[in-house]
Image (cartoon, rainbow, N blue to C red):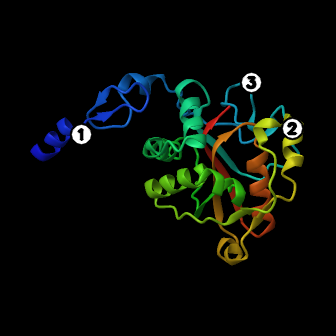
Amino acid sequence: MLLRSFEGLVYPKYCLFCKDIVEEDYVCSDCLSNLQFIDEEQCIVCGDINDPYHQFKSCHHKLKHIPWSYRAAAFHYTGEVKKMVQELKFNSATQYLPFAGRAMAKRLTQGSVPKFDFIVPVPLHIAREINRSYNQAYLLAEELSSNTDVPLVNALRRSKYTKPQSNLMKQQRQSNLDGVFKVFPTFVNRLKGKRVLVIDDVCTSGATLRACCKTLLENGVGQCGVLTLAQR
């Protein structure tokens, strides 16, 4: 106990957002209270928070087929959360990962959540991953796996180099991903009939997650869910 206190004096911990010294956690209480954590049930179609005027089974988007039976995000994509996602995505800000993984694990305790057999990250194309030197979705999935004991399986790959989704109009995003994702053949039998949770950093239109889940289901996965660190 004395050693831990001494280490805290020599190597103080700082809040990820305001940089004030914190004793135990990654984020100070003030910053934590300002983050918009989502702890209510969300519409599995569009991700909206459930309210008396929004019925899950008659979502106003009226999509013909939703390839997942569970959808959630840990935070709204705003303020410091937006900064965290951008830093993770483009600036190798791995100091956010323990906090992000814990927040995503906490989200899985909120509301009605099915039991998942495997966690699968959304993949980057190999050229983009080499250029960036990491895949932030994989790193988040790795943290989530360590916080939940649900095994991580890196089962998906991108077979085509596509334009970044953020550069496209909403109606272009799904067609940009047609036929892009494949399941590595070595994982097909392992995932057959299983319940898989697909992980990404942020959900905007949901096109990437839909394409990943569709591919998994076409290859024999029994059920898909999706979880992201944030949603727009």
Q: Position of residue 109 (x, y in %)?
A: 50, 45
Categorize mark 3 by other alpha carbons within 10 Å: few (<14), some (14-19), many (20+).
Answer: few
Where's residue 15, x and y in %? Answer: 37, 31
Residue at 64% of width from left, 62% of height from top? 195
Say which of marks 3 and 1 sits in front: 1
Earlier in the chain: of badge 2 and badge 3, it is 3
Which quadrant, please, contains the C terminus? top right
- Badge 3 or badge 1: first in the primary sequence: 1
Q: Residue at x 69, y 70 (%)?
A: 193
Q: Nearer the viewer, mark 1 or mark 2?
A: 1
Residue 81's image quarter?
top right
| Image location of residue 105, percent across then percent down | 49, 47
Number of marks: 3
Front position in the image: 132 or 23: 132
Pointer 1 and pointer 2: residues touching (CB < 8 Å)? no
The disc labelled 1 sits on which kind of residue? Answer: Tyr
Identify the amino acid type marked 2. Lys
Q: Say if 214 sits above or below 9 in the image.
A: below
The residue that disc 3 covers is 53
The quadrant in which the N terminus is found is top left
**Residue most extreme to the front:** 131
Q: Which residue is mark 1?
A: 11
Can you identify the residue that label 2 sits on? 62
| Label 1 CA crowd tier, 10 Å (few <14, some 14–19, many 20+) | few
Mark 3 and mark 1: Cα distance apart in space: 51 Å
Inspect this view and state whether residue 205 appears: no
